[in-house]
Image (cartoon, helix red, strand yellow):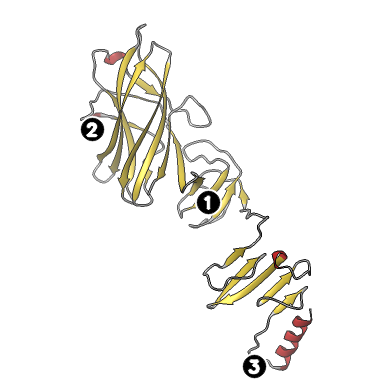
């Protein structure tokens, strides 16, 4: 504490002098502008230190502040971890649990909710509009967003060159593209067909990814996938997966539409995709992420 007393004394005697000194708490040999030795053992790994660099305050825990970098906070322990705030978000649009969130905030969400804006336990990053789930793929970081089909939809007749005749799938409104780049959309589709026969038929379905302009009411195709599926007798559901991808510009609004190919058995191959939001297996959903 000797250094503190000396600093106070000099400031009293010389109120108009600028004094540069190091302050040590539980240490007589401070290693930085302000140094707290938690155990009083002069071992840096237990200490809290701060320094000034380029007019900015730098704080280091368990290590000496590196004034050669732009880092404001440094964590030096090799046997500890950083623990973000643990909160229970109610949805990805929640702005109450963490009041007035801003872009760059990170939390660990502990709650599980349902619906098109559902959240699950894990790290979330706020992008200035909503909370995005932070997922580590093992080689790069991606933000995965999940949506359920909000209402069941039955396919209608349209060929692969008739996207304008397809039917819209309601995933809680268009997906707003936040950044220009390539995106993938992975679907898990579940539903029953209209097959009233005892025969196994073949249904050909087209799943479309489009952008939508609300001012002109124009849908622009971006990608399509053909699904050739066995159509079982009445009451037997079909489950299928598909992935679509395309490049988008920030501000694009993405929607999805579906149809089945006209056939002589058209009345028996209509596929009703089930909308059942929440933690259920019998539903249609989409997960999407930005690739680059």
Secondary structure of the residue carrying tag 3 is loop
Q: Is residue 104 toward the left or the right of residue 212 in the image?
A: right
- Percent coordinates x, y for residue 159 in the rendering: 23, 26
Q: Position of residue 185 (x, y in %)?
A: 38, 38
Q: Which residue is mark 1?
A: 95
User: Disc 3 or disc 1, which is closer to the eye?
Assistant: 3
Q: Nearer the viewer, residue 20 or 92?
A: 20
Q: Badge 3: few (under 14), some or many (20 or more) residues near its Cα, within 10 Å?
A: few
Q: Residues within 10 Å of mark 2 (few under 14, many from 20)?
A: few
Gap between marks 3 and 1 measured at Cα? 47 Å
Whether pointer 2 and pointer 1 mark residues with C-beta atoms closer than 8 Å, the reply is no
Give the Cα distance between marks 3 and 2.
Answer: 78 Å
Residue positioned 54% across, 67% down in the render: 71
**Point 63% across, 67% down: residue:** 60
Residue that badge 2 annotates: 164
Residue 134 percent across, percent down from the top left: 51, 47
Q: Is residue 161 left or right of residue 64?
A: left
| Total tally of numbered discs in the picture | 3
* SS at mark 2 in the image: helix
Mark linked to residue 245: none
Q: Is residue 279 above or below residue 232?
A: below
User: Which callout, 3 or 2, points at the residue further toward the start of the chain?
Assistant: 3
Residue occupying image coordinates x 23% and y 19%? 262
Q: Which residue is mark 3?
A: 16
Q: Quadrant of the N terminus?
A: bottom right
Indicate which disc, 2 or 1, sits on the residue closer to the N terminus. 1
């Amino acid at each position: 504490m000797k250094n503190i007393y000396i600093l106070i004394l000099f400031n009293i005697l010389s109120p108009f002098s600028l004094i540069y000194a190091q302050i040590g708490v539980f240490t007589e040999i401070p290693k930085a502008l302000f140094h707290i030795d938690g155990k009083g053992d002069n071992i840096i790994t237990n200490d809290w230190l701060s320094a000034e660099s380029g007019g900015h305050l730098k704080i280091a825990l368990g290590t000496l502040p590196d004034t050669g970098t732009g880092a404001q906070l440094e964590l030096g322990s090799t046997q500890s971890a950083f623990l973000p705030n643990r909160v229970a978000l109610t949805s990805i649009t929640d702005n109450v649990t963490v009041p007035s969130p801003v872009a760059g905030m990170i939390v660990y969400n502990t709650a599980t909710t349902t619906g098109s804006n559902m959240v699950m336990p894990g790290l979330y990053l706020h992008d200035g509009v909503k909370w995005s789930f932070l997922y580590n793929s093992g080689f790069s970081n991606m933000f995965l967003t999940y949506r359920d089909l909000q209402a069941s939809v039955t396919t209608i007749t349209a060929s692969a060159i008739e996207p304008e005749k397809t039917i819209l799938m309601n995933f809680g409104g268009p997906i707003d593209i936040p950044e220009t780049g390539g995106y993938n959309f992975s679907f898990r589709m579940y539903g029953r067909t209209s097959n009233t026969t005892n025969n196994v038929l073949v249904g050909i379905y087209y799943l479309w990814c489009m952008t939508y302009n609300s001012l002109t009411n124009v849908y622009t195709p971006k990608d399509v996938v053909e699904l050739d599926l066995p159509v079982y007798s009445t009451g037997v559901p079909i489950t299928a997966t598909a992935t679509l991808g395309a490049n988008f510009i920030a501000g694009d609004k993405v929607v999805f539409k579906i149809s089945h190919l006209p056939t002589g058995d058209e009345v028996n191959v209509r596929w009703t995709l089930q909308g059942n939001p929440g933690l259920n297996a019998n539903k249609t959903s989409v997960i999407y992420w930005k690739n680059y």
